Image (spheres, helix red, strand yellow):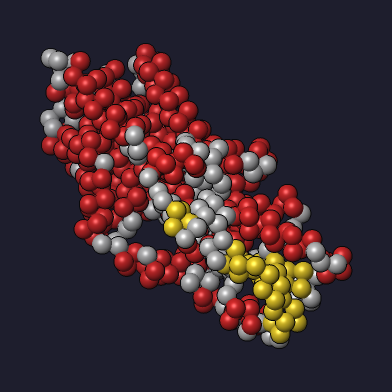
Amino acid sequence: MHPSSKKYLPIILTLSGIKLLIQCLGNQRYGFHRDELLHLSVSEHLDWGFMEFPPLIALLGKLSYLLFDYALWGVRLFPTLAGVGILILCCLMALELGGKLKAVVLAGVSILAFLPFYRNHTLFQPVAFDQLFWTLGFYFVIKFINSPHKKHLLAVGITLGLGLMTKYTLLVWAFGTCIGLLFYERGHLFRYKWLYLSACLSLVIFLPNVIWQVLHDYPILKHLQALNQYQLDDTDPIAFGMDQLEYPFTLVVSLIGIVAMVADQNLKKYRAIGVAVLVIFTTMWLLHAKAYYVFAIYPVLFAAGAVKLEALLTKKPALVYIVSAIVLLPSLYFIPQATPILPIDTYVKYAGLKEEKGRIELTGDYADMFGWEEQVQLVHSVYRSLTPIEKQHCVLWAENYGEAGALKILGKKYQLPDPISRHGSFWTWGYGDTKATVWISLGNEKPAVMSVFEEVKLIKTITHPYAIAEENNIPLYLCRKPKVDIEKWWRDYEAHIFD
């Protein structure tokens, strides 16, 4: 920690408290997002890897369950704390880069003003922890540049290893940082044994997931192939760049930061960081990555930009506070769009949404927080109507991981049996009771259930005014008499689990 950090601790804690308060207001509203239900579901099957992501999110999900029993606010506390950690690190980086009070204020305010972070630090997803490890990695690199001690390099190695156990995008961070370090003392660092020991430390931490990938025939490659086919191939490179322009005031701070680290005389010793950021951004762009993949580079840029602006306005220091206000105030109105701090009825009025055909179309993230409880309640009512013997041999079959996750996590309080699904990681957990006499099918369309069962009865078509379109008008069937070999039917679907 920077020697003068204690001096600025009150302002850092104040900014962190504001961040924590806003996030906690949003953490308790609406319901679980479909992705959160998946991440909590995998925590019930701890392993060194999963079909869609590395294992750290599952471990955090298990910890959440032990501490909070899957309370919504408790689960979301984890990404919120990651977000608070990012703000603190941003302020500390400003100090390490030579900034003082006003730089710390502007750096912290830039985090508060950056709207995507409110969404990222609300939902229980790997992205919040991924951003934390990127920021922590940059922090330790800066610490090493300021004080070339092996402990800082080893800290980078540990951060990289843990980051890779969170999200594989840390490989891009590592690539960009290695290129950037070629510009630190003309690449002299690459003759230093502790750099390679640090890399080995990362590999040791990451190795269990590598072994898991090998033993499971590299599911990450299949997932990336499906991701490219259904999402990333449609990513417009121009849109990737334009999406960065949606937040102009924080963008200006970040652009000043990157220019300062690459070209400014006072920050030239941090040129390696600036080059790393440029390499990372370019790599993500060329890979057709989603725009939010690069949001993790912004904290270090905010820190550098804040330091440079403080230096530029030395003769009129009060202007830094004015700049901070200009950066923050325009964002305040839009916070309810990024994290659900408003009750849903109030949000509908705030967003000017209108009801059409019994539905109010929310944004994708908010729409994905509704409807799950109602689905589980309906499945429970059907399950409760079964005879005791039928309950003992009943399978709950969900079409996708959101529905399966809802039955898995929300279904606990209804004492429902564990669901099955052929989607993603759920496929790896099997098909349940092959001798089941009754199947309750949630979300599977009629042709799918008719191909498996002789007797199919539609119980209800489920709708919800706020739920996302794909979770509206979904069928709930009661099925009997399987007419296929369930084990073979399950095994044959392996190539389609990411469809």
Q: Is residue 93 visible?
A: no
* Quadrant position of residue 157: top left
Query: Considering the image in quadrants, where does the N terminus appear?
Result: top left
Q: Answer with left or right where residue 169 lies relative to residue 24.
A: left
Residue 246 on image: x %, y %: 25, 45
Residue 405 on image: x %, y %: 61, 57
Report the residue at 51% width, 33% height from top: 24
Q: Answer with left or right where residue 492 lies relative to residue 156.
A: right
Q: Is residue 351 visible?
A: yes
38 up-or-down from 148: above or below: below
* Quadrant position of residue 431: bottom right
Name the residue nearer the viewer: 479 or 99: 479
Residue 140 on image: x %, y %: 36, 35
Q: Answer with left or right where residue 212 lies relative to residue 3.
A: right
348 up-or-down from 311: above or below: below
Report the residue at 39% width, 40% height from top: 350
Report the residue at 47% width, 49% height from top: 366
